[in-house]
Image (spheres, rainbow, N blue to C red):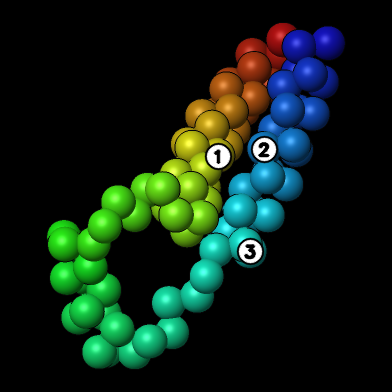
Amino acid sequence: MLITILTVVHVVISIILIATVLMQSGKQAGLSGAISGGAETFFGKNKARTMDGMFSRLTTICAILFVVLSVVLSVLVKMGA
């Protein structure tokens, strides 16, 4: 029963992770964009409040949850719970 619930949560987190990665804007500005992008990281205005910042934070959280839940599920299946 526990493994089934965790598997459903794992699938939901996977779908959210895929959606957040697809909704982020691309970084196709080339070398000049990489240089100015680095300056914007240090001197930019509150990037966390933009949609890109929100999707980036949500992607990070979902990725961490995905990895942790994958390890927990593999340990539970290995133990035969």
**Mark 1: which amino acid?**
Cys
- Residue contact between numbered discs 2 and 1, judged by CB atoms under 8 Å: yes
Q: Is residue 47 above or below residue 78?
A: below
Is 16 positioned to the left or the right of 5 in the image?
left
**Mark 3: which amino acid?**
Leu
The residue at which mark 3 appears reads as 22
**Mark 2: which amino acid?**
Ile
Nearer-N-terminus badge (3/2): 2
Q: What kind of element bears circle 3? A: helix
Residue 69: image quadrant is top right
Badge 1 crowding class, 10 Å Cα cut-off, few under 14, some 14 to 19, many 20 or more, is many
Residue 31, visible in the rendered structure = yes
Give residue 6's position: percent from left, percent from top. 72, 22
Q: Is residue 68 above or below residue 60?
A: above
Cα–Cα span, label 1 and label 3: 13 Å
Q: Residue at 66% of width from left, 54% of height from top? A: 18
Image quadrant where one finds the C terminus = top right
Q: Which mark is residue 13?
A: 2
Q: Is residue 50 above or below residue 62?
A: below
Q: Which mark is residue 62?
A: 1
Closest to the observer: 72 or 41? 41
Badge 3 crowding class, 10 Å Cα cut-off, few under 14, some 14 to 19, many 20 or more, is few
Q: What kind of element bears circle 2? A: helix
Image quadrant where one finds the N terminus = top right
Badge 2 crowding class, 10 Å Cα cut-off, few under 14, some 14 to 19, many 20 or more, is some
Give residue 54's position: percent from left, percent from top. 48, 48
Q: Residue at 68% of width from left, 45% of height from top? A: 16
